[in-house]
Amino acid sequence: MPPTSQSPPLASILVARFLRTNNYTETLDAFIREAGLPAGAGQVTDNKNENKWTIESVLEEKKAFDQTLGFERYGEEEKEEWSAPAPSNPKIVETPTSSNILACSVDPWRYPNDNEVNHDSPSHLIATSADKQLHLFKTEDENALVRSLPGLSESPILSYVTLRNGEYVCLTNMSGQLFLQKDAEILDRRKDHAKYAVKVVAYEDDSSPQKPIWIATAGWDSKIYLYRLTLPGEGPEADPATIGEPVAWIPLASNPESLLFVQHPDTKELLLLISRSDSTHLYYYQLQHQPLTTPYECNLLGKQNLAPHSNAWIAFSPSCLALSPHDPGLLAVATSTLPHMKVIIVRLLFPSTGDLDVSASGPEPVTQATQAFAALSLQNREDAAIVIQANTFAPQTSYSTPQVAWRPDGSGVWVNGDDGVIRGVEARTGKVVSVLKEGHAVGSKIRTIWAGWVDVMGDGEVVREEWLVSGGFDKRLIVWKA
């Protein structure tokens, strides 16, 4: 959108500039008198913002916007699935320090050596900030501070994941480090990434007798590392837990944006789903379940294009991936589209190992025609998998960090924005049905959001509430409730 002008309005300035540039002197004088403009209105100055917009450029911008509407995809409007009540009332949580919030969530976090913590309700409101601290808050109404951990990391913590119901925690930071923590003690640390370790995800394999834990970290050195943790048992004689060497790695052509562990619906095989910058694809990587003595490079099993019929070189990047809480094959994607974020809800097209094999019975000869038909068939399949593709009108720039989080009942998703506003998008229709404005400062960047059910102790009994938690560069940590 064009920049808003000061007084007088931008539209009048554009008209005055058009009349002055084309030497319509009499019409310009009459227009200035009728519109009440200053005598020098419409003069070209050295201000870049004022010189940027003309009537022609505004019309071109409007044409481009109208054209993009044709590429959006909305669902049925007969049945409204955005459940009510939804979180809408903000409560600002008092943090011990004033700093930008980088990550937040409600997760279990246990303190074996702390008798003051209620072990019956281990969930805590967790937040990391740009001052290298991690804060823990109670989930009760007052959200009182439980503990601040200032000495965990030498640089700000960008991502974390809890393990074994909060007994262990893995954290990554801007220095490219990975930490394994128990209570307030760092058990082990590694630095395999050369740059920011922006994301860490985990998968606990309970089907194996050893119950190993898969850990995947993504860094801005265009690499992903995988670790296989086998945590020790309880007791004083148990060996200390360690991260160990990476069991596998994935080199990428560009920096990773987001990653998830997903299970194949038919074979139950564990796959790693990855998105990266400068690519509209989702990439499926295969993991070796049998532990190997030497690290290996994961095989690319397949990929899925989120813009199958696009002729643009790069239309967007899938910046944030979130699986539906009720459908493991349904994925919500927040994209890097400019100037507004678009959300895609898509069915995952899980590849299989057989897709890479050539039939031994002798396939048809490969010709340009068969290749073209195969490519078109794949594009149509990828296009049919896209359920929703909609504009959220959440402003963002190339420096933004798009975020998407499902509502716990699966009725819609929340997205962040650089204008201090959180928007709710209905999953069935793709329409923006909720706009939360009263929490964050106007025009501030919302860096992180989380949504889910939270068990809260109230009046002697546990009550389940739907929460939306957000943190931003206005240094506010906010809990939204219905």
Image (cartoon, rainbow, N blue to C red):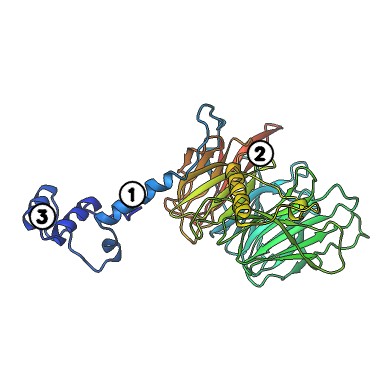
Of the pair 96 and 72, the residue shown nearer to us: 72
Which three-letter amino acid code belongs to the residue tagged 2?
Answer: Trp
Q: Mark 1 = which residue?
A: 62
Q: Amino acid at mark 3?
A: Leu
Q: Are marks 3 and 1 in contact (CB under 8 Å)?
A: no
Q: CA distance from mark 1 to mark 2?
A: 42 Å
Identify the residue at horizontal 79%, vertical 46% (top origin).
268
Q: Quarter of the image holding residue 155?
A: bottom right
Residue 31 in the image: state x and y as whole percent.
11, 51
Q: In screen coordinates, is 335 left or right of 261?
A: left
Mark 1 element type = helix
User: Label 3 belongs to which residue?
Assistant: 28
Q: Earlier in the sequence, mark 1 or mark 2?
A: 1
Residue at horizontal 33 percent and vertical 54 percent from the top: 2
| 77 on left or right of 271 | left
Tag on residue 453?
2
Q: Nearer the viewer, residue 62 or 6?
A: 62
Marks 3 and 1 sit apart, C-alpha to C-alpha, by: 25 Å
